[in-house]
Amino acid sequence: MEKSKIYISGNTGGALDHLTRIKIESATRELRSRGYIVRNAIEICTDIDPEDKAGQMKRRAAEITVCDKLLMLDDWYMSTEANVEYTICKLLQIPSEIFENFINRLNLKPIE
């Protein structure tokens, strides 16, 4: 049985970018090691100019619509883009959950 396709969301802009990048990459590795299909803005937007916010958001929105679940890092609420991702999921009735709650509920390894 194929595992869920998960989109990881976090504060990918501003001063926390480096820390969030580490968190997203770690979460992605951990979930993939458990067989999940994982998508995140860092990986799916590598070919889009960082200044092209509209282009990045279009790509992110398209990817979210084919995911089964949105997992949000603890800093997601500080990002306009992550708030849009959450809103898209809410409107499309795609389940969302705080990443830490998800890993605790499934007894997975926490982000280090």
Image (cartoon, rainbow, N blue to C red):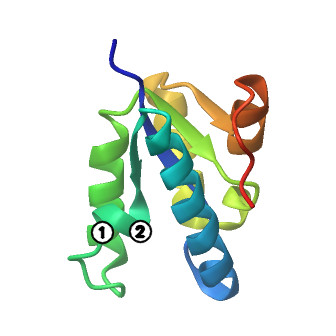
The residue pinned by badge 2 equals 42
The residue pinned by badge 1 equals 45
Label total for image = 2
- At horizontal 35% and vertical 55% (from top left) the residue drawn is 60
Along the line of sight, which residue is nearer the eye, 99 or 83? 99
Tell me the crowding category of disc 1: few under 14, some 14 to 19, or many 20 or more residues within 10 angstroms, Cα based: some
- At horizontal 55% and vertical 31% (from top left) the residue drawn is 90
- The image shows residue 93 at horizontal and vertical percentages of 49, 22
| Position of the C terminus by quadrant | bottom right
Q: Is residue 58 left or right of residue 89?
A: left
Q: In this view, does 32 lie to the left or right of 9?
A: left
Give the CA distance from mark 2 to mark 1.
6 Å
Q: Which residue lies furthest to the top in this view?
A: 1
Disc 1 residue type (three-letter)? Cys
Along the line of sight, which residue is nearer the eye, 24 or 88? 24
- The image shows residue 108 at horizontal and vertical percentages of 69, 34
- Circle on res. 63: none
Asked if the residues shown at circle 2 and circle 1 are in contact, with their CB atoms under 8 angstroms apart, the answer is yes
Disc 2 residue type (three-letter)? Ile
The answer to whether residue 18 is above or below residue 22 is: below
Q: Quadrant of residue 14?
A: bottom right
- The image shows residue 67 at horizontal and vertical percentages of 37, 33
Helix, strand or loop for disc 2:
helix
- At horizontal 56% and vertical 73% (from top left) the residue drawn is 21
The answer to whether residue 62 is above or below residue 96 is: below
Helix, strand or loop for disc 1:
loop
Q: Is residue 30 left or right of residue 104?
A: left
- The image shows residue 63 at horizontal and vertical percentages of 30, 46
Along the line of sight, which residue is nearer the eye, 47 or 91? 47
The answer to whether residue 43 is above or below residue 3 is: below
| Position of the N terminus by quadrant | top left
Tell me the crowding category of disc 2: few under 14, some 14 to 19, or many 20 or more residues within 10 angstroms, Cα based: some
